[in-house]
Amino acid sequence: MANKTHFWSPLAQKLSKRQFLSTVSAAAAAIGLTKGRSAKAQSADYDAVIVGGGTAGLPAAIFAGQRGGKVLVIEAAPVIGGTLFLSSGQMSAAGTKLQQSKGIEGDSPQSHYDDVMNISHNTADPDILRLATENAAGAFDWLTDNGFEVYPHHPVTGTTHEPYSHARYAWHREGGMGILALFEKQLEPLMESGAVTIKTSTEATDLIQDDSGRVVGVATVDADGKTARYMGKNVVLTSGGYASNSEMFEELEGAIDYSDVSYPYSQGAGITLGTSVGGYVRYGENHLPLFGAILGDEEYPAPMVAVARHFPGDRPPWEIIVDAQGKRFLQEDILSHAAYEEALLEQPGEECWTVWDHEIHTQAPPLISGGFMGMMEKENIADAFNEGYHNFFKADTLEELAEKAGIDAKGLTGTVSKYNMARVTGHDDLGREHMPLPIEKGPFYAIRLQSWFLTTFAGIAVGKDLQVIKQDGSPIGGLYAAGELLGTGATSGRAICGGMLVTPSITFGKLLGERLLQFDV
């Protein structure tokens, strides 16, 4: 399968990496993150060489530089920031100054740890999670002390995924871009003094080891094809995940990468580098899909044209959701994203169909409601059914609809009949209560829904000090890792735990720069 790069795009359009980067560069210029800013006199000797200038790599550079170290950041993209360009800036931490200011008492790192373990059914990495929760408040307070702004009603216990026991979940008012601006402000004096040097449009191609196997540097190639070697007392991999590398995604998580909507430079470079010197990958088994992608074609990864509104708290369901056999497999009005995601995980190919009739089509709130990120306007949705766009189906009978959509006709008609009877009796086998209209009047409609992903669950294995380890548990000297490179499966397990993507990345970057990297200052 070809490894293509897509981004959120209109129907039947794909946004190229060049187009994406022009948009990113314009946004970056607004906060001073241009390539010219990172041009500094280079030295062949650094206390830390950091591969990846994003959510974990930048705080690592900031704190290592403030500690007195000489730091080089190598970034493949033309600008620093990584997935912060796409992030909503969600964080969670227990025992913060923000909680104290809001009168929130009784929270603790232990409670935060217990909540994540409970939500993830004990699939998160105990050591990594412990390190994250015990140090999250320090990282969060550092951000708020330096201008990190959350919504006025935050922190909260949660939103649409499983809630926490205490209000510790907070979003940045400007999303990841606000965090990136904060990082840039912290970096500015360090770059001016020469403590931190940033090389953009530079790809790390190999790790350099000494005779003992210790990692002592990084080999690179820049956009002009010029190669270089940068030696460092410590090498830190913070290059993100592999969500835009469909082949690696399928290899590590065992699922189809239907639609690449992540950062184009999330190519798994850290996985490749880390394993090349003896590291290994874990937690791919914690793979969990997001629900409701509507795709524009079957050349995967395909452009995502919309996402179905499936969370009952936002829009109670009028339709039913069925599998390829035409059978319902989840309670459509359950107030849990996690229930939807776990149910989809059990479906072959992580796909399903939502089905309804003319009366529902006329009376129900829009299922798509303008699409995802402005990709699909209302008139496009009508055209999608009338003109037979990919994954949009319309027919005069349920049997004809099933044939067009690729659903078992006998199973679908039986399911619809059973659902209509449950609506009359008020007793649904799956426990659904919101059943406003029957499904009985043609024309009938269906949309095929498939899984999608923003982050990746497998990651490079590290020990308690974030040092990359071998399969036998022994550390690889001089090599550390942090951020999404560790895998969502390490910090959240097989679940989506509020704030447990951005927060551990910043926390671990801060820890590495502040005290874990080994160098004399």
Image (cartoon, grey):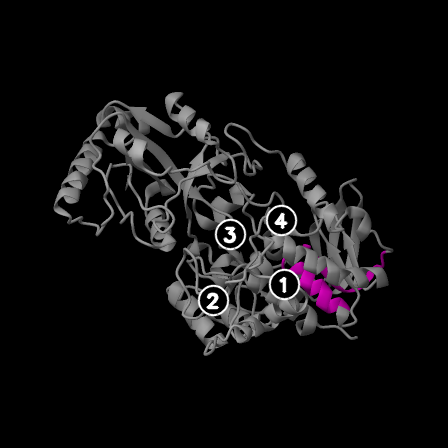
Estimate the spatial distance between the alpha carbons at disc 3 and disc 1, rounded to whole Å.
26 Å
The residue to which callout 2 is attached is 125
From the viewer's perspective, is 388 left or right of 486?
left
Label 4: state its secondary structure.
helix
Kindly identify which residue carries mark 1. 148
Can you identify the residue that label 3 sits on?
456
Mark 1: which secondary structure?
loop
Quote the CA–CA distance across marks 3 and 2. Answer: 15 Å
Q: Element type at marker 3? A: loop
CA gap, disc 2 to disc 1? Answer: 28 Å
Q: From the top left corner, tell me how far across and down residue 211 is, in percent.
A: 72, 64
Location of residue 102 in the rendering, given as x and y in whole percent from the top left corner: 52, 72
Amino acid marked by disc 3: Thr
Q: Is residue 343 above or below residue 260?
A: below
Closer mark to the observer between disc 1 and disc 4: 1
Specify few, some or many for label 1: CA neighbours under 10 Å numbering under 14, 14-19, or 20 or more. some
Residue carrying label 4: 85
Mark 2: secondary structure: loop
Q: Earlier in the sequence, mark 3 or mark 2?
A: 2
Magenta residues span 42-65
Q: Amino acid at mark 2?
A: Asp
Q: Is 48 a magenta residue? A: yes
Bin the neighbour count of mark 2 within 10 Å (Cα to Cα): few under 14, some 14-19, many 20 and up: some
Mark 4 surroundings within 10 Å by alpha-carbon count, few (fewer than 14), some (14 through 19), many (20 or more) = many
Q: Earlier in the sequence, mark 1 or mark 4?
A: 4
